[in-house]
Image (cartoon, helix red, strand yellow):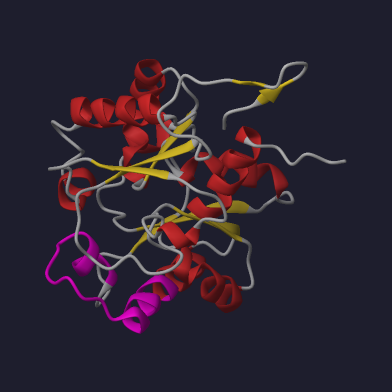
């Protein structure tokens, strides 16, 4: 944001755009982004800047380790910073792989994945309880993804690959339309499976940035705290624009 200083009321420039300090790197996808999805601008209680990274499909990033996309993401991130972004995030938790590379290349704070919350949430839990992770693709979420954002390698994980709607629409791109109720059932079933196999789970972090629309239903279903990209990015933004108390 351009600021006024006194005396003289000097407006500070140097950017192309003002009032939207957070930039979001978007995958190249065509599925519906409902309210609560990171790619729906009305999800956020503050303005954001978007850049779509052409060719970086969900299938390439989630199932193929984002091979060959790093340079394109860095270029798009630099464009966002040049426009006025003071911090960068991404709309796929699997881009955790590039946390260090983005941080080094972009020169601003970077938060690639909601999984960065795992250590914070773990610190809130009583002894004997652990954080569990619900991801869009448990089979391709690798130790490298986890290590890149300081998540324990043995964290309990459940994916949505065997669901009826969420995975096949978002990752396999089998169709552009999505049955929201079926997608929610996929998230709920993944959460139920997680706590069945790991009764020690005391809180859940949602890896996928398309899962916040279903977080409230999952919390109600399991009776556990649920954290997602919305909870992390609202915290992230609060540091960029702290509330001014009179």
For the point 32% across and 24% down, the residue is: 78
Furthest residue in direction right, as rendered? 246
Q: Is residue 24 left or right of residue 165?
A: right
For the point 50% across and 35% down, the residue is: 18
- At which x and y percent is residue 202? 63, 59
- At which x and y percent is residue 138? 31, 54
Furthest residue in direction front, as rendered? 8
Q: Quadrant of residue 15?
A: top left
Front one among 155 and 17: 17
Dominant secondary structure, magenta: helix
Q: On the rendered image, what quadrant is the N terminus found in?
A: top right
Q: Does the image show residue 143? A: no
- At which x and y percent is residue 106? 38, 20
Q: Quadrant of residue 203?
A: bottom right
Assess whether residue 168 is covered by the magenta stretch. Answer: yes
Q: On the rendered image, what quadrant is the C terminus found in?
A: top right
Bounds of the magenta span? 166-188
Q: Is residue 244 left or right of residue 94?
A: right
Assess whether residue 163 is covered by the magenta stretch. Answer: no
Position above or below: 7 against 191: above
* Count of numbered marks: 0
Q: Is residue 208 left or right of residue 131?
A: left
Front one among 134 and 179: 179
Q: Quadrant of residue 236?
A: top right
Position above or below: 183 against 171: below
- At which x and y percent is residue 146? 40, 37
Front one among 39 and 221: 39
Q: Is residue 178 left or right of residue 93?
A: left
Q: Does the image show residue 233? A: yes
For the point 14% across and 64% down, the residue is: 173
Position above or below: 166 against 1: below
């Amino acid at each position: 944001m351009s600021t006024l200083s006194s005396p003289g009321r000097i407006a500070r420039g140097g950017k192309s755009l003002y009032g939207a300090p957070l930039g979001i790197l978007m995958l190249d996808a065509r599925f519906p982004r409902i309210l609560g999805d990171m790619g729906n601008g009305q999800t956020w209680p503050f303005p954001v800047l978007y850049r779509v990274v052409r060719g970086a499909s969900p299938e390439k990033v989630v199932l193929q380790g984002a091979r060959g996309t790093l340079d394109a993401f860095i270029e798009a991130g630099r464009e966002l910073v040049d426009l006025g972004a003071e911090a960068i995030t991404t709309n796929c938790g699997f881009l955790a792989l590039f946390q260090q590379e983005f941080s080094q290349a972009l020169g601003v704070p970077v938060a690639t994945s909601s999984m960065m919350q795992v250590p914070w949430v773990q610190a809130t839990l009583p002894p004997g309880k652990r954080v569990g992770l619900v991801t869009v693709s448990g089979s391709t979420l690798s130790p490298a993804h986890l290590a890149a954002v300081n998540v324990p390698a043995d964290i309990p994980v459940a994916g949505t690959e065997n669901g009826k709607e969420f995975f096949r629409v978002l990752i396999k791109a089998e169709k552009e339309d999505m049955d929201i109720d079926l997608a929610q059932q996929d998230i709920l079933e993944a959460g139920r499976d997680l706590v069945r196999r790991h009764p020690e789970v005391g809180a859940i972090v949602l890896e996928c940035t398309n899962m916040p629309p279903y977080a409230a239903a999952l919390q109600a279903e399991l009776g556990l705290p649920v954290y997602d990209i919305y909870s992390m990015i609202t915290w992230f933004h609060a540091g960029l624009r702290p509330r001014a108390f009179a």
